[in-house]
Image (cartoon, rainbow, N blue to C red):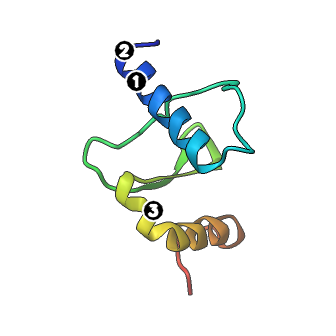
Amino acid sequence: MTTPLNLLMDFRLDNKCLISFPTAHGPVIMTKTCLYTMPPDRDFILDTLPEHPNVAVAVGADHASKFASLLGKFSANWPLRGNLNLI
């Protein structure tokens, strides 16, 4: 949904790009709002789907970015070892 605030932000971003990268500037093809998902308790979710135990889920709130490498290790070892242990 396009709102006056979205139009203003698009205008500001477009002008900044024009000033910073004049030779790379071009028409806007598409914009999309980033969806921000967060569990109610703001904790990480590392689990499998009950109906599909072969599907692993690793979700974190905004602060999860600080733990991306650790979550990656968990996610990589999980299918190989069948558990979340890193050792």
| 2 vs 3, front mark | 2
Label 2: few (<14), some or many (≥20) within 10 Å? few
Proximity of marks 2 and 1: CB atoms separated by less than 8 Å: yes
Which residue lies at the image location 42% right of the left edge and 68% below the top edge? 66
Q: Earlier in the sequence, mark 3 or mark 1?
A: 1
Looking at the picture, how far across and down is residue 8, in whole percent? 40, 24
Horizontally, is 50 left or right of 30 in the view?
Answer: left
Q: Is residue 51 above or below residue 10?
A: below
Residue type, label 1: Leu
The residue wearing badge 3 is 65
Viewport quadrant of the C terminus: bottom right
Residue type, label 3: Ser
Q: Is residue 23 above or below residue 63?
A: above
Which residue lies at the image location 32% right of the left edge and 55% below the top edge? 43
Horizontally, is 66 left or right of 15 in the view?
Answer: left
Picture quadrant where residue 39 is located: top left
The residue wearing badge 2 is 4
Q: Residue furthest bottom?
A: 87
The residue wearing badge 1 is 8
Q: Nearer the viewer, residue 53 or 75?
A: 75
Q: CA distance from mark 3 to mark 1?
A: 28 Å
Looking at the picture, how far across and down is residue 56, in whole percent? 60, 52
Proximity of marks 2 and 3: CB atoms separated by less than 8 Å: no
Horizontally, is 25 left or right of 1 in the view?
Answer: right
Label 3: few (<14), some or many (≥20) within 10 Å? few
Label 3 sits on a secondary structure element that is helix
Picture quadrant where residue 83 is located: bottom right
Which residue lies at the image location 51% right of the left edge and 42% below the top edge? 16
